Image (spheres, grey):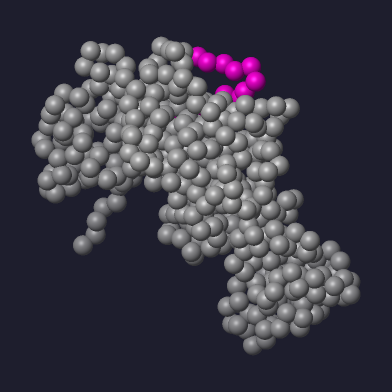
Amino acid sequence: MLIAMTASSALKTDRYELTMLEAALRDGTAARQSVFELFSRRLSGGRRFGVVAGTGRLLSLLRDFRFGEDELRYLRDAKVVDAATHRYLEGYRFSGTIRGYREGELYFPGSPILTVEGTFADAVILETLALSVLNHDSAVATAASRMSIAAGERPLAEMGSRRAAEDSAVAAARAAFIAGFGATSNLEAGRTWGIPTMGTAAHSWTLLHDSEEDAFRAQIDALGTSTTLLVDTYDIRRGVETAIRVAGTELGGVRIDSGDLPIMAAEVRAQLDELGAIGTKITVTSDLDEYAIAALAASPVDSYGVGTSVVTGSGYPTASMVYKLVARQGSDGGWVAVAKASADKASKGGRKAAFRILADGVAQSERVLVADGFEELGVQESSDGRALQVTLVEGGEIDTAYEGPAGTVAAREHHLKVREELPVRALALSKSDPAIPTEFVDVA
């Protein structure tokens, strides 16, 4: 039996979002104006900064957050919600406002990464979607940024599609690109997000042929001498000799995917130079992460290909972000700051405005202004800080500048720019406290 697929993102959510909606419609609180905030209490893995990623994807998914006939039929057949809630969802369109950190921005514990304002009904059912997108993409981007810093000026390519779920692989390629990677092996990421793609051949290509030389000749015939030949299927030294004999000294590159990479890279560079292939580049792959890349800094390596580590957040596949109600209108119409007080899971109530405080262009702190409602904050400026939040959705209308390939490129450019603000201590890979403190300032 074939099941018709739909572009709707409305059921990419948890059931309890809709049960809360049903209860709120019953008791009359669904229409209360509310402010939800997406933030992280701590940085995963003792990292010194986090990178916001996924915002552009979330906005596009928000546009598709509609309960069509298929979605409504499922909710009815599975008895998920009552008739009144079913009728409400028929016409659901997010009509509120979303402000947040620009994609590619750095964040720290307590940073108000995303602020969703609207009725409780409007905003509560976006929780799961927002968290699933930003938790995944930000985890990948944070790991990718650390790898990019470790690589310095050397190019990085993302090649981890086979280590992730099919849709996650595309999202991970996008997040890695935003955080400093220059290319991906994933063609869907290239088509959807405009990311440069790369790729030549795997070991199976060499194994297919009667000899390594036959495989290299066939690849050169198909792709020209600018291609990169994989030289470690059998014996690396013999593979390099064969590659240069077949392609000549103008061969574009060789790839090493095994062995003690610092030693192998040095030996291959020396052999290439002895053969006269002084312009042939060396790419290394083989289970690289930020630590392995840093260890290769002094080696004669020209570029890196990273797979498993980047698409899994280098050991931390989630950014540990949460989505909490921080302010609401009371029964008297006045604004009330609300916060969770549970041990180790407390939140800071109130609507917020955030600034990066700088001194001579270097980040000193994250300053977050906090107020119960809207009037107290108004439009805040800071003479010594950079405003961090932008309007992503206004009255339900999405700012398309943050979507698609153009939005992805803009996020990458923004990230590389703001990363220059980090203090030197933030660039270290060892576990430590956040690079800058987060200061909360109550606004009377």
Question: Residue 321, position in %: x, y?
Answer: 42, 42
Q: List the single residue furthest toward the bottom.
A: 210
Rendered-image quadrant of the N terminus: bottom left
Give the quarter of the figure containing the C terminus.
top left
Q: Which residue is drawn at 68% across and 43% down?
A: 425
Residue 332 pos. (x, y %): 23, 13
- 389 to the left or right of 258: left
Q: Vertical placement of 129 versus 366: above or below?
A: below
Closer to us: 13 or 24: 24
Q: Quadrant of residue 116?
A: top left
* Res 385 visible: yes
- Residue furthest out toward the front: 343
Q: In this view, does 24 lie to the left or right of 240?
A: left
Reply yes or no: does residue 381 show up in magenta. yes
Task: Determine which quarter of the picture holds residue 124.
Answer: top left
Across the whole image, how many numbered discs are drawn on residues?
0
Give above or below for 163 relative to 410: below
Specify whether residue 408 is in view.
no
Q: Is 22 or 322 nearer to us in this picture? A: 322
Residue at horizontal 62 percent and vertical 50 percent from the top:
146
Q: Which residue is drawn at 18% across and 30% down?
A: 24
- Residue 388 sits inside the magenta stretch: yes
Estimate the x, y position of residue 43 in percent, counting from the top left.
Answer: 51, 45
Q: In this view, does 316 lie above or below 387?
A: below
Q: Is residue 55 left or right of residue 345?
A: right
> In terms of depth relative to the viewer, which is nearer, 98 or 9?
98
Residue at 37 percent of width and 21 percent of height: 395
* Magenta segment: 379-392
